Image (tube, coloured by chain):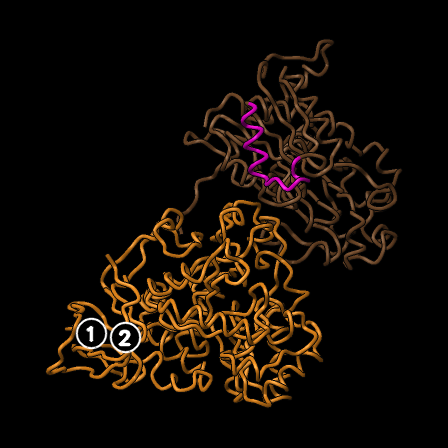
Chain colours: A orange, B brown
Amino acid sequence: MKILIKGGRLIDPASNLDRIGDVAIANGRIVHLGDVGDFHAERMVDATGLIVAPGLVDLCARLREPGHEHEGLLESELAAAAAGGVTSLVCPPDTDPVLDEPGLVEMLKFRARKLSRCRLFPLGALTRQLSGAALTEMAELTEAGCIGFSQAEVPIKDTLVLSRALQYAATYGYTVWLRPMDAYLGGGVAASGAVATRLGLSGVPVSAETVALHTIFELVRATGARVHLCRLSSAAGVELVRAAKKEGLPVTADVSINSLHLSDVDIGYFDSAMRLTPPLRQGRDRDALRAGLADGTLDALVSDHMPVTTDEKAVPFAEATPGATGLELLLSLAMRWAQDSGLPLQRALAVVTAEPVRVLGSALGSLSASAGRLVEGGVADVCVFDAGASWAVMPERLASQGKHTPFAFASSGFELPARVRCTLVAGHIAFEAQ
Amino acid sequence: MLSKRNPQLNKHGELIHLLSIEGLPRAVIEQILDTAGSFLSVNDREVKKVPLLRGKSVFNLFFENSTRTRTTFEIAAKRLSADVINLDIARSSTAKGETLLDTVANLSAMHADMFVVRHSESGAPHLIAQHCAPHVHVVNAGDGRHAHPTQGLLDMYTIRHFKQDFRNLTVAIVGDIVHSRVARSDIHALNILGVPEIRAVGPKTLVPGDLRDMGVRVCHDMAEGVKDADVIIMLRLQNERMNGGMLPSSGEFFKHFGLTPDKLRLAKPDAIVMHPGPINRGVEIASEVADGKSSVILPQVTFGIAVRMAVMAILAGNEA
């Protein structure tokens, strides 16, 4: 279908594009950007007063299929992605069964493609069953569509296995995605500190993150593997990443919308919506994460989308399943961070478009030239949104099956900026606001 | 984020649940202590009953074993003429997979007026209080390592009884403080009542530096910790601590942090020795001290019944 997006403010952080203009789309691609002359569109999207940006690229969203269909389905979660303006997402391998077989990966990609709501880039398991012992067939999994390898939330305890996994991945130039968390130190349910002490919750000290980072960096030095660090949570952690990058180590890092905006004080009276991994740390950690995202130490902002059921949250804090819904909040929380930090809108968009694509690098194949970007001849993955609007998060109105979020208006008391009006994936309209 | 209203108080600032000492106004604590004083005389009568909770049902929901605390709550409720039902949760529906909230909902359908809850997870009584019917009151009988407010209150009653004025006391709490809900409740109460010097005494694995955030002076030396103390509260050392790699042995603990007559001599001559019980003789406290003239461990138990009567009577009189 030929679509014309008319009169919006076109912003592409990767090319510094920022002008009023049109976007002409045909055959799934952007055929013309800017001043579009004759173009007989079958469908027109009026973008007057709206921003026209690349579709968002979310480096961590869990779709809960296969295995956790009670909590979420591909249909609901990919619909949530589209509602959030997300056109590409990376999902971790901690499904059930674990994504350690090429057949599973192919099935997942096939089903997602049929839904045409969002592009899916799965991470393969680094070890079979995520058990931290035997390596997976990384080359086979890459052929099936995996863009990297991960241990999800299950750190490898055996350093010899971890070292070999990195070494093997380095053979092929695959990126290994690791959560910097020591398995033993990281067993608590809340960040160590005054709040955890007062509430009598078992603590996760900062050393759980820094010990893991030191180990990972040492092994990167030894093996030359590329590592993407998933979800930094502490000021000390950010410092270590900064030093590692300065040294020239091939590492990138991301931070979640939750850690970027919240701190342990928000736990209040044991609010299980705040039961998250990594745990929410103190205000100065949050400030360091914000500064780290601003100066590029942290490359990307992720939703860390994790749909959980009410049954999993309506239990004592320590027993609750960690996680919160996030796909529909990613754009708004990126904007809010930029507003709070005095950064321009382009920067808010960069950390959820161009920068995540840069992290993914060549793993995206031919898409890497145009995903997360608005470029003539490139894929028509577009997010049209109203930067001036604000909205109250009402869980029951979210498209995701996951209704639990710390940013629900009823508990946060504030509205979020920016409302998605229209999302296009490969030139089809995947979402349109009513 | 929205600052959340203290769930223990109604909009008039009256107590509708007792979940934690933290956040209680000083006046509420003093009201409980004063009311407890009036109930002490009830316990001395031949017929030890007042009709304040007649017709009310008090359900003891103990998800964690405790004969002694459950018994004192039962005695207290019966002295107020309430009907008491004890739920042995380990053998009940929870073992069959029923969630905490479903258990509470089922019991509420049996017209409970008050739940006395003990649970191994911090925050469980808060969760129950959030979900139970408006007229039902929740009393926290101990949740994880978070709080044991009635113990904290009876400890304060004991200190007030023997020392009168909180404002010029030095109180030392000794032992496994990081895992202790009693210690947390005591520390909050002592701070609210204006005790100027509160010391947390023990090895670093049991008394980490970040306890300072609660308003205590951290001491890793027993002699320094009890020097010139007016009140020494000893905590029981749990065996799990040795298994969890936090301590090598109870013998080494006793040698350095046990309360012996020698260590007691460093405190003030009229210092009182307290313990929430049950005591481990020769582990945290020497027999000679537990049975000696400074020990007020047994009066604590008597005061505990009166304090629990006071808490239940006050709660029953306040509406959500």
- Quadrant position of residue A141: bottom right
Q: Secondary structure at mark 1?
A: strand
Q: Quadrant of residue A23?
A: bottom left
N-terminal of the pair, mark 1 or mark 2, is: 1
A379 or B200, nearer to the observer:
A379
Magenta stretch contains residue B103: yes
What residue range appears in magenta?
B93-110
Residue type (three-letter) at the residue carrying disc 1: Ile
Which residue corresponds to the image point at 80% horizontal and 57% vertical from the top-left? B247
Pinpoint residue B248: horizontal percent, then vertical percent: 83, 58
**Residue A3's disc number:** 1
**Mark 2: amino acid:** Gly
Chain of the residue where label 2 is placed in the rendered structure: A
Percent x, y of residue B129: 52, 35
Q: In the figure, is residue A132 to the left or right of A315?
A: right
Marks 1/2 in contact by CB < 8 Å: the verdict is yes
The residue nearer to you, when weighing B12 against A308, is A308
Q: Residue at x 80, y 46 (%)?
A: B266
Residue at point 29%, 55% (across, down): A391
Report the residue at 23% width, 64% height from top: A386
Same chain letter for marks 1 and 2: yes
